[in-house]
């Protein structure tokens, strides 16, 4: 029997919190506890990402489940004394919700957490990902035991089919169908692959799942292996995810030691093992055929389908590839049943979805909600609304393959079909909230710069087309747009979509098309009026000083790196426009609201 | 570590049940030792240590032990509140090591309140 403690202090060790110093915080807490002689009654442990990265470094104290934000190294001595010696809640680090203006100590009562439903992330913040026993303690590997000893491959496939689980990587293809095709394909050697090549800018769902609950992914792959008849699995993970790789390696090592990977797993007669393969960070390698080429040691480029991977995949053997989050759902479905899973979500999109919520919202972080949750609920109830009380302008969903939805669509439910109707795609789960200061031409340009760079070059329409789109958008944002440019953008976009081989090209124009569809007037203002309504595009704005408001305090003059502001003390100042680089430092520093941006 | 058999999964689950209970809020009984200045001065530390020892000796995994500030009845310290899920909490006063052990055995483990050491049934709201 393991030793019992009166308190568990769980320090978040997700990438975000580690970056803000959480491991040092953990060490200091341990040191302070020893200084007070409390090491026999208080346990300190680390967990994976809590999801509320904006509040890091995060520490959770059980049994009460109290959430402490921004507990830094220097706060630890006071914290330990208050919490453990005096037995008080440490108010200084409690979370407060702005509109309620009250402290909310208990984690599950904070809006960010209480509006979430955790399936793929069910163990987050509750287990140490490096300790397999804690995973087993929360029903870990029970689904594996059930699938390997009590279910036939056909029964497993049937259960996944009935659950309605669809691929969480972006396209949303039925996981059960994929498994069924591969199960029915004859072959002695088959492979099951996990796509952990998360590449969308601003997306970190898969990294977080791997870091906080690696065994859930391993389990999903073992069950999938049994279903399709594969004895070997690969996880294709970005080399830029060192912490995820470290935890995966440790998890695989522990699972092998326990015989949960290897020969004759749990005496079931089923053999299965998993290896990691590191991707070098090429965006196109997230495409399934390119990913397989990459594992084979070739240059990562997509190939035409058919043949589909279920018939001819890795090394021309029948292969199934699923995303990290998809696998993390599988053990839950086997354990709790397809009916339970299908009770979550909407008619066609079952279960939950993890999103990386970022941009101009108050609560940036990783969230999991039932399919069909409205954008409004995500942005306001979970995200805590827009920063600095600004207005919401758009929500970007699905990364470089997705689109920008206007604020008027905030009440649409988030499911595969509803999102596709808007011109965006669900994608892997990136969600960037933008306020009124975001320029839509600039956003389209940002994503096209990314896809033009990441296009593998195999298909000319994608290779050249994305480059032309990017150049055209650059011209427009620099005031060199001409009449007819919008039509050119639309025309090229349609051609890229129609004639590209893989998902990268087929979706790359989405950011352009959706911004034109919902924010056409903004393009027109850039092209015809040579104005940027969001005041973002540097070539289209000028900075001037309002002589009425200027008090001659000289602050802007001192801050100007170009030294292009002149004026005597206590007299109105003037900006020399020919030298101004529009860095906005004068605007940011003025205390009298005297700098005009037009 | 030898390779696991299916029944071993259950054994591991039993082994770490205390951790799961602690973090998941699924405890059967909760003991709160009042650790205000008055409580600490009157020996609450010893009471806390005794409960901790008893929990570990008994091998139970569904009891949580926590602390709170002053209970407001400084003359009756050290005090503790025991709450078995589904029943009213009971406040115990003027505790010492022997009383604490008996309360743990009778109330926490066997779910029978020790009325002779009790002040009252009921508790202030805690979180």
Image (spheres, rainbow, N blue to C red):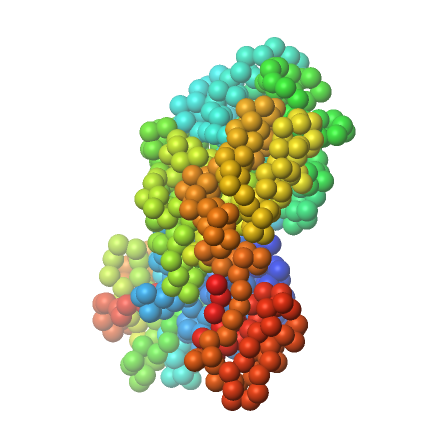
Vertical arrangement, residue A143 with respect to residue B51, above or below: above
Q: Residue furthest top?
A: A186
Q: Is residue A377 above or below residue A228?
A: below
Q: Identify the residue at image location x=43%, y=22%.
A: A161
- Is residue A480 at all visible to an observer of this figure? yes
> Residue A170 location, x and y as percent?
51, 34
Tell me residue A396's x, y (percent).
47, 45
Tell me residue A98's x, y (percent): 36, 66
Relative to residue A137, is residue B96 drawn left or right? Answer: left
Q: Quadrant of residue B99?
A: bottom left
| Foreground pick, A308 / B110 | A308
In the image, residue A212 lies at what x, y percent?
Answer: 55, 48
Which of the 4 image quadrants contains residue B25? bottom left
**Residue at the bottom extreme?**
A570
The residue positioned 38% from the left and 58% from the top of the image is A391
Q: Establish if A300 lies above or below A76.
A: above
């Amino acid at each position: 029997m393991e030793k019992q403690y009166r308190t568990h202090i769980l320090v978040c060790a997700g990438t975000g919190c580690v970056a803000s110093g959480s491991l040092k915080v953990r060490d200091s807490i341990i040191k302070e506890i020893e200084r007070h002689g409390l090491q026999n009654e208080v346990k300190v442990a680390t967990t994976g990402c809590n999801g509320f990265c904006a509040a890091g470094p995060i520490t959770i104290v059980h049994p009460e489940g109290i959430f402490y934000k921004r507990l830094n190294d220097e706060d630890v001595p006071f914290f330990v004394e208050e919490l453990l010696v005096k037995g008080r809640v440490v108010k200084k680090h409690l979370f407060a919700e702005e509109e309620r203006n009250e402290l909310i100590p208990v984690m599950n009562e904070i809006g960010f957490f209480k509006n979430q439903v955790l399936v793929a992330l069910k163990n987050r913040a509750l287990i140490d990902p490096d300790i397999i026993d804690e995973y087993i303690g929360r029903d870990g590997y029970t689904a594996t035991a059930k699938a390997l000893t009590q279910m036939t491959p056909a029964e497993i496939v049937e259960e996944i089919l009935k659950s309605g689980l669809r691929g969480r990587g972006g396209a949303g293809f039925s996981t059960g169908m994929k498994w069924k095709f591969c199960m029915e394909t004859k072959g002695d050697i088959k492979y099951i692959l996990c796509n952990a090549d998360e590449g969308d800018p601003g997306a970190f769902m898969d990294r977080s799942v791997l870091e906080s609950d690696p065994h859930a992914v391993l389990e999903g792959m073992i069950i999938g292996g049994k279903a399709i008849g594969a004895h070997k699995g690969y996880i294709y993970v970005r080399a830029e995810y060192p912490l995820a790789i470290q935890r995966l390696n440790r998890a695989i090592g522990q699972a092998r030691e326990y015989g949960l990977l290897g020969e004759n797993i749990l005496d079931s007669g089923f053999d299965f093992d998993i290896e990691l393969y590191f991707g070098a960070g090429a965006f196109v390698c997230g495409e399934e055929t390119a990913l397989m080429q990459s594992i084979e040691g070739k240059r990562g480029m997509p190939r035409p389908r058919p043949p589909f991977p279920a018939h001819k995949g890795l090394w021309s053997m029948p292969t199934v590839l699923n995303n990290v989050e998809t696998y993390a759902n599988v053990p839950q479905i086997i354990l709790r049943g397809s009916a339970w899973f299908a009770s979550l979500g909407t008619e066609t999109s079952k279960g939950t979805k993890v999103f990386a919520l970022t941009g101009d919202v108050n609560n940036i972080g990783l969230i999991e909600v039932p399919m069909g949750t409205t954008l409004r609920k995500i942005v306001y109830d979970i995200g805590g609304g827009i920063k600095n009380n600004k207005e919401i302008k758009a929500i970007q969903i699905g990364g470089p393959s997705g689109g920008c939805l206007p604020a008027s669509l905030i009440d649409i439910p988030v499911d595969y079909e509803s999102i596709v109707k808007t011109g965006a795609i669900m994608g892997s789960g990136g969600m960037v909230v933008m306020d009124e200061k975001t320029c839509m031409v600039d956003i389209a340009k940002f994503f096209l710069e990314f896809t033009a760079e990441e296009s593998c070059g195999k298909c000319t329409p994608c290779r050249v087309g994305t480059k032309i789109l990017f150049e055209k958008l650059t011209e427009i944002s620099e005031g060199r747009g001409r009449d007819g440019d919008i039509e050119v953008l639309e025309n090229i976009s349609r051609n890229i979509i129609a004639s590209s081989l893989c998902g990268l090209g087929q979706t790359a124009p989405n950011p352009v098309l959706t911004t034109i569809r919902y924010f056409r007037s903004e393009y027109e203002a850039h092209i015809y009026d040579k104005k940027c309504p969001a005041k973002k595009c540097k070539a289209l704005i000028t900075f001037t000083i309002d002589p009425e408001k200027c008090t001659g305090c000289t602050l802007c003059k001192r801050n100007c790196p170009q030294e292009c502001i002149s004026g005597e003390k206590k007299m109105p100042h003037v900006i020399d426009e020919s030298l101004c680089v529009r860095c906005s430092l004068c605007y940011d520093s003025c205390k009298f609201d005297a700098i005009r941006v037009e | 570590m030898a390779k696991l058999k299916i029944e071993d999964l259950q054994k591991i689950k039993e082994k770490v049940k205390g951790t799961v209970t602690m973090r998941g809020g699924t405890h059967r009984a909760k003991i709160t030792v009042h650790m205000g200045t008055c409580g600490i001065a009157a020996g609450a530390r010893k009471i806390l240590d005794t409960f901790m020892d008893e929990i570990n000796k008994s091998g139970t995994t569904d009891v949580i032990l926590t602390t709170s500030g002053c209970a407001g009845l400084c003359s009756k310290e050290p005090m503790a509140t025991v709450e078995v899920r589904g029943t009213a909490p009971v406040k115990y006063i003027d505790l010492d090591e022997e009383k604490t052990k008996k309360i743990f055995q009778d109330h926490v483990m066997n779910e029978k309140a020790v009325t002779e050491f009790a002040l009252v049934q009921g508790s202030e709201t805690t979180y």
